[in-house]
Amino acid sequence: MSDQTITILVGVAMLTGLLGTVIPWFPDLLLIWGAALAYGLFVGWGTGGAVLFGLMTVLALAGLAAEVALTAAGARVGGASGWGIAAGVVLGLIGLVLFSPVGALVGLAFGLLAVEGYRHRNLREGARATAGALLGWTASFAAKFGLALAMVVLWGVWVAVG
């Protein structure tokens, strides 16, 4: 496969990843990062490619951290306790492993609802904490979009510089 073909395929993957930041459960930052890694391995690192890839790695990690942090912050604003957030995270991870990304969101919501509903003896308070977490998770899309866009721009610089 020619370098030009690989560059086009990586570009398509980059745009797909960028789109994925605004569509739930669609590949996003990791797809962009993986496409950049493939570009480096197949086309070459060139002048500054390793540095740009390193920056892209930092941005991808920041995006993943932002998703977790904004979701937790939203839960806190909604009145969730540390235990509620912990239960949401644990059940979210179990849901992710067993049922894909949809399971992660359902697990998060159920964990928060159950713990906060029990803690307050009121499901309405549990629902408020869950709604806060979902609002924070939704806000994370904006952060991830900005970081993904920066990653795509860095890759564009990498391609242009060679």
Image (cartoon, rainbow, N blue to C red):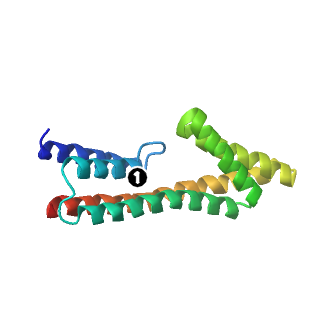
Please indicate whether residue 106 sits to the left or right of residue 48 in the image: right
Q: Residue at x 21, y 46 (%)?
A: 42
x and y, in percent, of residue 45 in the image? 22, 57
Q: Nearer the viewer, residue 43 or 102?
A: 43
Q: Residue at x 64, y 55 (%)?
A: 133
Q: Amino acid at mark 1?
A: Leu
x and y, in percent, of residue 9 in the image? 22, 43
The C terminus sits in image quarter: bottom left
Residue 103 in view of the camera = no
The N terminus sits in image quarter: top left
Q: In the picture shown, does residue 62 fall above or below 94?
A: below
Q: Nearer the viewer, residue 134 or 87?
A: 87
Q: Nearer the viewer, residue 81 or 60?
A: 60
Q: Residue at x 13, y 46 (%)?
A: 3
Judging by the rendered image, the residue that carries numbered circle 1 is 29
x and y, in percent, of residue 99 in the image? 58, 33
Q: Nearer the viewer, residue 108 or 42?
A: 42
The total number of labels drawn is: 1
Q: In the picture shown, does residue 37 fall above or below 156?
A: above
Judged from this view, the residue extending furthest toward the top is: 99
Packing grade of label 1 (10 A; few <14, some 14-19, many >=20) is: many
Residue 73 in view of the camera = yes
Q: Tell me the SS state at disc 1.
A: helix
Please indicate whether residue 88 sits to the left or right of residue 26 in the image: right
Please indicate whether residue 20 sits to the left or right of residue 1 in the image: right
Q: In which image quadrant can residue 151 be found?
A: bottom left
Q: Residue at x 18, y 48 (%)?
A: 7
x and y, in percent, of residue 53 in the image? 31, 60
